[in-house]
Amino acid sequence: MTPTATSASQVLDAVPGVSVRLRRLATFASLTVVPSCVWRLAIAAGIPMGWGPGSDLHHSYYPGRESLVLLLVTLLQEGLGLLSLGLVRRWGEELPRWIPRLGGRRFHPLVAVVPAALGALALTAITCLGAVTWNEVNAANPDAPTGLALWIFNVSYAPLLLWGPLLGVLTVAYFRRRRLLG
């Protein structure tokens, strides 16, 4: 894409009242899922990631049918991560024009706010609980990663701790902006 084409697409998708800071925050929120997705795809490809032979994530099971499950979970997580961008983009306020008879219509702010707020709360709770209990789970499972593999796992999943709170900030900003604009 040329710089002009990129600028044109950004202008067409620009939403009045959305600061550069919020757009960057939304981009960052959508990127928090990438490291854990890459880690999961490595397992799906059969790359040893430190799980012992008693674990369902041991590399001897991959690649294979089980890889499809990891791929689908990754695609779902990536898709949900990209939805953060909808809180600062035009497609998060109105239906795309290509949808017959409905395209271009704005939708009520709560259509985005309710799922985003519930998602932010759930993500924050799940990731914080996971971070707090991981050592207990790891100690109870002799096939869990240790050493360098554990460090890679932690680095891959740590950004997810930011996803929920960032989504919460974006949701509040979206709600305030849409409420003020009517």
Image (cartoon, rainbow, N blue to C red):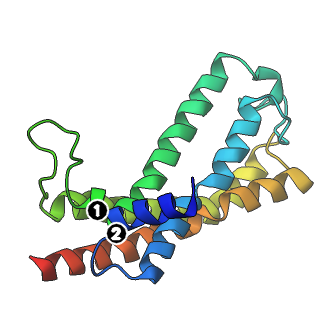
Please indicate whether residue 159 sits to the left or right of residue 55 in the image.
left
Q: Is residue 103 in sight in this rendering?
A: yes
Q: Quadrant of the C terminus?
A: bottom left
Q: Are circles 1 and 2 on residues that touch, CB within 8 Å?
A: yes
What residue type is disc 2 on? Answer: Ala
* Residue at image mark 2: 14
Up/down of 25 relative to 150, above or below: below
Q: Secondary structure at mark 1?
A: helix
Q: What residue sits 81% from the left and 55% below the top?
A: 152
Q: Residues within 10 Å of mark 2 (few under 14, many from 20)?
A: some
Tally of numbered discs: 2
Q: Quadrant of residue 135?
A: bottom right
Residue 178 screen position, x and y as percent: 18, 74
Please indicate whether residue 176 sits to the left or right of residue 57 in the image.
left
C-alpha gap between disc 1 and disc 2: 6 Å
Residue 23 screen position, x and y as percent: 44, 73
Q: Which mark is residue 90?
A: 1
Q: What residue sits 60% from the left and 32% below the top?
A: 71
Q: Residues within 10 Å of mark 1 (few under 14, many from 20)?
A: some
Q: Secondary structure at mark 2?
A: loop
Q: Is residue 89 in sight in this rendering?
A: no
- Which residue is at the front of the view, 150 or 136? 150
Residue 133 screen position, x and y as percent: 63, 60
Residue 83 screen position, x and y as percent: 40, 55
